[in-house]
Amino acid sequence: MSAPMQRYMENAEGRDFNLVIVGGGITGCAVAYEAASRGLTVCLLEKGDFGGATSAATSKEIHGGLRYLKNREFKLVRESLRERRILANIAPNLVHPLAHLMPLYGISSWERAAMHGALTLYDLLSYDRAKAWDPVKRIPAHRMLSASEALSLEPGIRPQGLSCAAVYYDCQSLMPERLTLAFLQSALKHGARAANYAKVEGLLGQKNGRVVGVQARDLLSGRELEVRGGLVINCAGPWADLVLQKAGLEAAHELRRSEGIHVVTRPLVRSHGVTRVYREGGHFFVLPWRGHSLIGTTDQDYAGDPDHYQVRAESILALLEKVNEGFGFGDLELDDVLYAYGGLRPLVEDQTKGTYQTSRRYEVTDHGASGLEGLITVEGGKYTTSRGLAEQVAGLIAGKLGKEISPCISSREFLAGCRAPDLSAFLSSAPERLAGADPATALTLSHLYGQEAESVWELSQDDPQLARPLNPDGEILAQVVYAARREMARTLCDILLRRTGLGSLGHPGQEVLSAVARVAARELGWDQDRQEEEIRQAEAALKVPGKEVA
Ligand SMILES: Cc1cc2nc3c(=O)[nH]c(=O)nc-3n(C[C@H](O)[C@H](O)[C@H](O)COP(=O)(O)OP(=O)(O)OC[C@H]3O[C@@H](n4cnc5c(N)ncnc54)[C@H](O)[C@@H]3O)c2cc1C
């Protein structure tokens, strides 16, 4: 069993770290793991919950980014394809290959050949895709299909005008929130410290302009704390420029924010992610996910304060309209939406292009060049490339600190809890390892918690209520106990949306919500008022904007 995650704010040691990381999205957590596993001391501070912002708003794709080939971003695509393979290797329980079917309507034979050419290039750029640690993670090459072959695979797609289709592969992350957590847990395993609900409110500076740490506030207790470090790494995603403003700096390039939303509905596809690319630009997809469909996404400039961002009913209706136009799944309405979520892409490029064309490249800025030594900003990028980005940043960090670091292990070792070298054997042994569990529970716990599944299941052994399946995935109240005791969950939303999947298929029903809140209250010492407030906040987070509550 792994050690429980300790929240730094209650366990502050007053020592100096090599790195203080601002932001616990995938970028911050990957940098924390990379640095800690190579011998540096690290403290990571996150103002919300770990992985709860942009990193929870993804399409759950771990992908090369086929469409970036159009912009000739070959380097980005190659790097993403390499990282896709690495993530499927190091987190085999959480990252799986997914076949994508792209129906092509009214296209000429030349356009068909062009698509075949682009997909051949995509295959070539992932030349190492068969070098998976586990054969089940090997990714096949693409193939072109006739219209009738495509319809036999996915009968729900619109048949009118269908010329042909392509099948290609990427990976899907079962639960990006837990993948981000696995990076953080890997960092903690190597000695890093971290706290959620710890907001960086200012940077500590010396007279010579050097940044030497941060001023943080514990949002749970109100306590203020200075955390000192040799370098401060700003990994605040769409807030990165706001963190820089605390140091009186503007971002090197103006940071743009683009909104993207997704909705979850009843299952519309069988087993392929269906992607529709529009001639006028843009693409939409319907992906199979946890027995449901995940539909996305939009790409719209967002000019407001990132703290006030919320999915709006208009955005959902606009997405449904596009999907109704382009797919043959019937007329989806707001009532069909079970859950909606969105986020802001931090994009680093000039303002001359629409957000859809803007590069998903990342950018690393050493503010020493503008007279502020000790501060590095890491912005932009994709979830998929975060580990690789962290590996690159580690070199820069070591140079700045003047320290020798040990070789990179993050591409070679399983993430914390994810050691399942033979996934099929691991999953088929689940009913045996979790003796007495419902088969769905055994499978889901094995996927979500990997090696820790047994520790979660054991928590239910003295209390049958904790073992009762609550949803079709077989999730159980023992996960709530585990989240509170061992995974630093502090709110009901942390539990429903980021430690378990109890909330991300939509409102789990009043009975389940109350049961989860009762267990959380007992574990986290909430009084009746706090419990009711947590339920109110969870109801607000689970509500589909514009949809009447049944
Ligand atoms: C709609 C959408 C779909 C996407 N789909 C994909 C996809 O399918 N595949 C893919 O690879 N990529 C995808 N991406 C991109 C990917 O989500 C991002 O590149 C990635 O999540 C960025 O991670 P981050 O850690 O930099 O930012 P974030 O996850 O936003 O993390 C930054 C963190 O900093 C914290 N913070 C901010 N200010 C402070 C402060 N003062 N003190 C402490 N903490 C602070 C925030 O609370 C936040 O948690 C998608 C993005 C969007 C928006």
Image: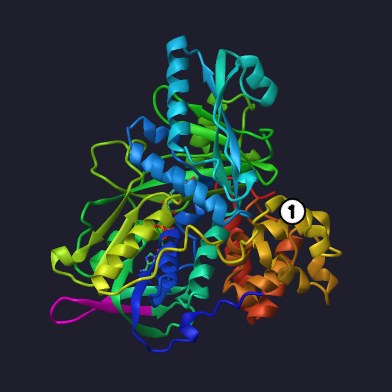
Q: Secondary structure at mark 1?
A: helix
* Left or right, residue 126 beside residue 210: right
Query: Which quadrant of the figure has residue 376?
Result: bottom left
What sort of colour scheme is used for the picture? Answer: rainbow
**Kind of residue at disc 1:** Ala
Q: In the shown orientation, is residue 375 left or right of residue 324?
A: left
Q: Quadrant of the N terminus?
A: bottom right
Q: Position of residue 451 (x, y in %)?
A: 67, 65
**Magenta portion: prevailing SS class:** strand
Inspect this view and state whether residue 59 appears: no
Magenta highlight range: 203-216
User: Ligand 1 near label 1 (Cβ, under 8 Å)?
Assistant: no
- Queried whether the magenta region covers residue 140, the answer comes back as no
Give the mark count. Answer: 1
Residue drawn at (33%, 74%) of the image: 201
Q: Is residue 330 above or below residue 29?
A: above
Q: Residue furthest bottom?
A: 14
**Residue at 62% over, 49% down:** 134
Tell me what residue is drawn at x 52 percent, y 19 percent.
104
Residue 207 location (% of width, % of height): 14, 82
Q: Quadrant of ligand 1?
A: bottom left
In which image quadrant can residue 229 be found? Answer: bottom left
Q: Nearer the viewer, residue 502 or 271?
A: 271
For mark 1, what is the residue? 425
